[in-house]
Image (spheres, rainbow, N blue to C red):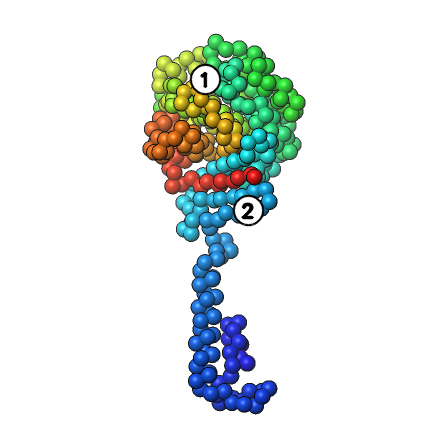
Amino acid sequence: MLCKDGVSVDKPETEKNASSGNPIGRRSFLKLLVAAAAVLAGLKALDLILPRRGEPETRTTTSASVSTTTSAGTTPLPKGSVVVIVRGPMGVNPQLLVDKALEMLGGVEKLIPSGASLLVKPNLGFYEKDATTDPRVTSAVIRALKRTAPTRVIVGDSSVRGNDVEYALQVTGTRSAAEEAGAEVRDFRKDQAVTVNLPKGIAMNSVNVFKTVRDCSYIVNVPRLKRHSATVLTISLKNMMGTVTDSEKGRFHQVDLNQCIADLNSGVRPNLVIIDATKIMTKRGPTGGIMVESNMIIASLDPVAADVIAAEELFRAEGINDLRGSVSRVEHIQRAAGLGVGVADRSKIEIIDVKIT
């Protein structure tokens, strides 16, 4: 037998069969060649079907507990931003969602430098639990971050004007959950204000933020996904308003709220966004909306891309068909992208969608 490209072929008629000594006829030889060609064609087709090493693929891999779907196709995605969505069943432990999201982003140890001073910024603008970040999510984020051996982890916020921060920390359960997880808890209103320049700002060229915000080397933004009457949505970009003084919040509303949110993020940009979408506030907000159980965490290193994908999820929960068109009309997201805060172009956002079962 001859071996050609991994396929065994009989010798031609001019040679004798080594074992039998009988010659092979021309017709039999031709039939064998045709069969070999068919086998080779089948192997080539299989090679085209199966992805080669290093090539992006659209795949759904399922294990006993996790299935993963990526948005990558056979053509490499444009260079842009990665957003991870982790979905779980009803009653799933938020720690599982947060840990999986960070794992899919590359691993918390690789994302955050060892020995960093970390600020965890939840949404504590209100006393209503549904209007604030779930303390279980805040706690899960802290526990994950502690694996990087930070010098400190601070949880802090300033509520909307007129609301008491300490009361919000107590009534939502955030203070007890954060302290139990190993974080310091701060009422930013008791902090000193410092001025940060905004070279890219359009509505303002500087802003007064709390000193803790400026001094921390790494900001982890942990907003609740919800509606907002003044800005359509409040997710990671708008959640950064909790880092500015009350007088600045008033200025934002007087000047141009959407542009001021974009300007703020151009100078005080979160390093990591972990969106609490375990429940989504739909239809109206920032309080009193209709809550939709979604058991989901959305994470990214890009606050604009994170808000784009989270906004799509909110609009989908409301039954809106034109998801991308609706997102394109959220002014502060688009303006932040215009200042280079992140990517809003949907074609440049890679989605990694993970389901925990």
Q: Nearer the viewer, residue 282 or 250?
A: 282
In the picture provided, is 110 more to the left or to the right than 27?
right
| Image-quadrant location for residue 102 | top right
The mark nearer the N terminus, 2 or 1, is 2
Specify whether residue 204 is in view: no
| Residue at 46% over, 40% down | 351
Which structural element holds mark 2? strand
Label 2 to label 1, Cα distance in Å? 38 Å
Say what amino acid the circle numbered 2 marks. Answer: Thr
10 Å crowding of disc 2: few (<14), some (14-19), many (20+) = few
Numbered mark located on residue 287 in the image:
1
Relative to residue 90, is residue 61 depicted above or below? Answer: below
According to the picture, the residue beneath numbered tag 2 turns out to be 62
**Where is residue 188 drawn, in percent x and y?**
54, 16
| Residue at 38% over, 23% down | 232
Say what amino acid the circle numbered 1 marks. Answer: Thr
